Amino acid sequence: MEFNSGRVFLFRVPEGEELVTFITKFAEEKGIKAAVVSAIGSLKSPRIGYFDEERGEYKIIKLEGTYELVSLMGNISLKEGGPFAHLHAALGDSEGRLYGGHLFEGEVFVAEVFVQELIGEPLERKPRKNGLSLWDAITRRTPGNLSLQPSP
Amino acid sequence: MEFNSGRVFLFRVPEGEELVTFITKFAEEKGIKAAVVSAIGSLKSPRIGYFDEERGEYKIIKLEGTYELVSLMGNISLKEGGPFAHLHAALGDSEGRLYGGHLFEGEVFVAEVFVQELIGEPLERKPRKNGLSLWDAITRRTPGNLSLQPSP
Amino acid sequence: MEFNSGRVFLFRVPEGEELVTFITKFAEEKGIKAAVVSAIGSLKSPRIGYFDEERGEYKIIKLEGTYELVSLMGNISLKEGGPFAHLHAALGDSEGRLYGGHLFEGEVFVAEVFVQELIGEPLERKPRKNGLSLWDAITRRTPGNLSLQPSP
């Protein structure tokens, strides 16, 4: 939960790459186990998700065409032993209207990505009853004390 | 205005917590006086604000249901002696449409929060004539010189 | 592409300043050559852009009135020898609806800006065939190896 700052990267992803895959492979190749990630740019045919609690799964929303990547925000942590990128995106159409959600994929037209590596205890996603893979939450057991505690 | 980087935290807030309160209490318990904050996740019944300059107060917008927390961005600084979280949020509905503004409250379904502590001179919010509590602004008194100056 | 963390700044821009210009001048005055930037606040009459690939230029969208600056995200790098700010913004109207894209300009009502300087090799924008000024992209020449490579 508390980390030391590791390496920092700022780079452009080549046109045509799938952004989520590229960031994941970047983490693998650099040996990044935890990080925060942000980016701006422009994506084609992004596929975003809205998590439907009742069904316990994502509803997929496919956007057609090219969108300004107004914000990409998220993190990298471990899932099933390897780095996993959890990313949310806000996407602007040609009229300036914004759409967004969990980013499943998007073809890069332009992507300028910032990665701040975090060094510390392993931060792992584990499957939860609600259908999501999540880290253990921190909880307040006593006033003035925030500690790590497994959750259902 | 210039700070040293302090501690860094990346953590999941437990389901059911009110997000703004939780981040504020986290800062109190950790002794954080200044920080930048970002997060992604999913919030229930978020209450956002649009600042109405003429009235000098926020118009409150209540969103019903569960929204993807596409971006949470903001900072922690001092207000009336304690840490105060100023947070703006972009929220996505089940069709991928985005809504947002100043985040007053939201019940956490999922929240993955990054906090970068900043160490330096106290950064304090003070009530201003326009109805907002703001830090002193930096101003350019002379070309090439940005310095701190109290504002009305 | 890999950098060392430099100075960090968190400050309020004075009301009435044009935000993109102010951030650029801030970088010039502080001698910042590379950085990541984020901000929240409120902007008047923002002018945003959607890049039209076919025309190779931005379509300009003028928003009237005052908008919550829900997220400002981007970076500073070198263009034609000086610091250049590439910024994307999400903006909320009085009903909480979001608009956004590439931020060309906006008059500051409130802007709380975070700048994380990055120290390293020069990161330079160069004109590309598609009409944009971009850094060289990193590419994967071989599996397991991400390296810098000029692109068209």
Image (spheres, coloured by chain):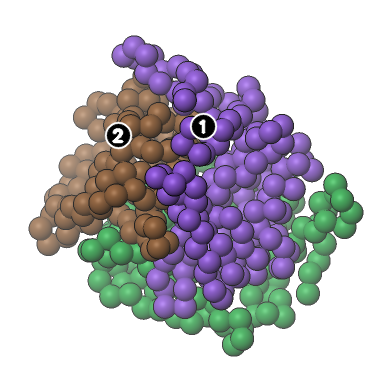
Chain colours: A green, B purple, C brown
Residue type pointed to by label 2: Glu
| Residue drawn where x is 66% and y is 58% of the image | B19
Chain under numbered label 1: B
Left or right, B93 with reference to A31: left
Marks 1 and 2 sit apart, C-alpha to C-alpha, by: 21 Å
Q: Residue at x 40, y 63 (%)?
A: C95
Q: Within 10 Å of the Cα at label 1, are there few (<14), some (14-19), or many (20+) other Cα atoms?
A: few
In percent of the image, x 55 and y 49: which residue is there?
B87
Q: Is residue A79 left or right of residue A103?
A: right
Tell which of B148 and C115 is nearer to you. Answer: B148
Q: Nearer the viewer, mark 1 or mark 2?
A: 1
Compared with B42, B6 (above or below) is above
Q: Position of residue A65 (x, y in %)?
A: 25, 71
**Residue C37 locus on image (x, y percent):** 43, 39
- Give how far across and how far down residue B55 sits, in percent: 44, 47
User: What's the residue at 36%, 78% (across, down)?
Assistant: A62
Is residue A138 among what the camera can see? yes
Can residue A32 be seen by looking at this rendering?
no
For mark 1, what is the residue? B128
